[in-house]
Image: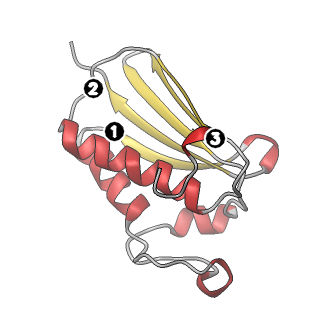
Amino acid sequence: QEQKRATYLQVTAEPGSVAGSEDSLCYALAEMVGNAATFSATGTPIVVTGAVRADRYRIEVTDQGPGLTAEQRAQVGAFVQFDRKKREQQGLGLGLAIARATAKLAGGQLQLEAGPGGRGLTVVFDLPLVA
């Protein structure tokens, strides 16, 4: 809503319970969606899916922005930003690092993948299911 992208947000999620603090998980997901909104053009969709896969819950946030190279995806961490001047980034580069740490604390992982057809970025938040 802050970036006026809510109308382009497409969310589909299966029910499931995961480990971790609800507040922390919501914050991490907000960071992932916020990054997608920041780095993709207005008018392009941001797709969020949540699905049960065996004993895991997988959340994917996919945008159609410029994406990151394989080398950049491997380098993502705290205070790391790419093409800062070109993309006029205002933050500290902590969003995905916080999301990655949140996933790890919950027994999961965060992965960055090229978006469909090599366009954009897909952030995968994979968490263990709880009974």
Q: Nearer the viewer, residue 67 or 36?
A: 36
Q: Which residue is tagged 2?
A: 18
Q: Earlier in the sequence, mark 3 or mark 1?
A: 3
* Residue 31 image position (x, y, % from top left): 41, 54
Q: Residue at x 30, y 41 (%)?
A: 26
Mark 3: secondary structure: helix
On screen, 7 above or below 101?
A: above
Mark 3, residue position: 8
10 Å crowding of disc 2: few (<14), some (14-19), many (20+): many
Q: Position of residue 9 (x, y in %)?
A: 58, 38
Say which residue appears at 33% left-offset and 38% top-offset: 108
Identify which residue is drawn at 43% across, 75% down. Answer: 91
Q: Which disc, if any, is residue 58?
A: none
Q: Write down the residue under mark 1.
A: 108
> In the picture, residue 98 is in which quadrant?
bottom left
Horizontal relation, residue 25 to residue 38: left or right:
left
What is the distance, in whole Å, between disc 2 and disc 1 at their CAs? 10 Å
Measure how far apart labels 3 and 1 are at the Cα level. 28 Å
Q: Kindly check if marks 3 and 2 are in contact, taking CB atoms under 8 A apart as contact.
A: no
